[in-house]
Amino acid sequence: MTETDLKQGFYVGEWEIQPLRSQVVGPKGPVHIEPRVMDVLVALASRPGEVLERTELLDTVWQGRAMSDEPLNRCISKLRGVFGDTPQAPAYVETVPRRGYRLIAPVRLPEVQSGEAPVKPRTLPVKAAVNVAGIALLLCCSLSASS
């Protein structure tokens, strides 16, 4: 699985992951997570079961701009909080001491039924769509007024 495949959505265990919306949907409904936290999850999910070195995660997610492990530690902690996971008895994210982290829950892409088109990303929420339409209308009016 590549990070590009995963950006359209995937599952970790019973959780539906929606990277484009920075959201995970679980038994209690949707939970919004910060974009960097989602980037860490997508990086881990791109190689499920494999240890991703701390330096590799920092380079991938922060492009070498992180000056310490603290941002990564915070993201892992937030992921564990969302999943209800613990470092002592992990079901999702396992810490590999002095190395990095491993996503141990199963990862899968949404299934596409034969003859069906792949699931498309969700559309804008109604409020956002109305705002976009309003801006477009204002631009059209201002352009026609200036002609």
Image: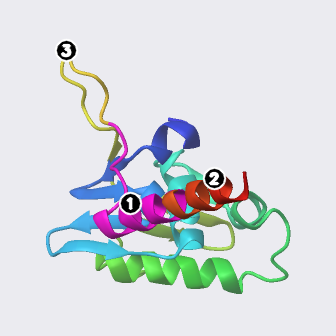
Looking at the image, is mark 2 or mark 3 earlier in the sequence? 3
Name the residue type under label 2.
Answer: Ser
- Span shown in magenta: 120-136
Q: Residue at x 85, y 72 (%)?
A: 65
In the rendered structure, the answer to whether residue 95 lies left or right of residue 65 reads left
Q: Residue at x 32, y 63 (%)?
A: 125
Disc 2: CA contacts within 10 A as few (<14), some (14-19) or many (>=20): few
22 and 2: which one is in front? 22
Disc 3: CA contacts within 10 A as few (<14), some (14-19) or many (>=20): few
For label 3, the SS is loop
Numbered disc in front, either 2 or 1: 2
**Residue 47 in the image: x percent, y percent?**
53, 45
Q: Residue at x 29, y 80 (%)?
A: 84
**Disc 2 and disc 3: Cα gap in Å?**
48 Å
Please say if the residues under marks 2 and 3 sit with CB atoms less than 8 Å apart: no
For label 2, the SS is helix
Name the residue type under label 3.
Answer: Ser
129 and 62: which one is in front? 129
Image: 77 above or below 124: below
Q: Which residue is mark 3?
A: 114
Q: Which residue is mark 1?
A: 129
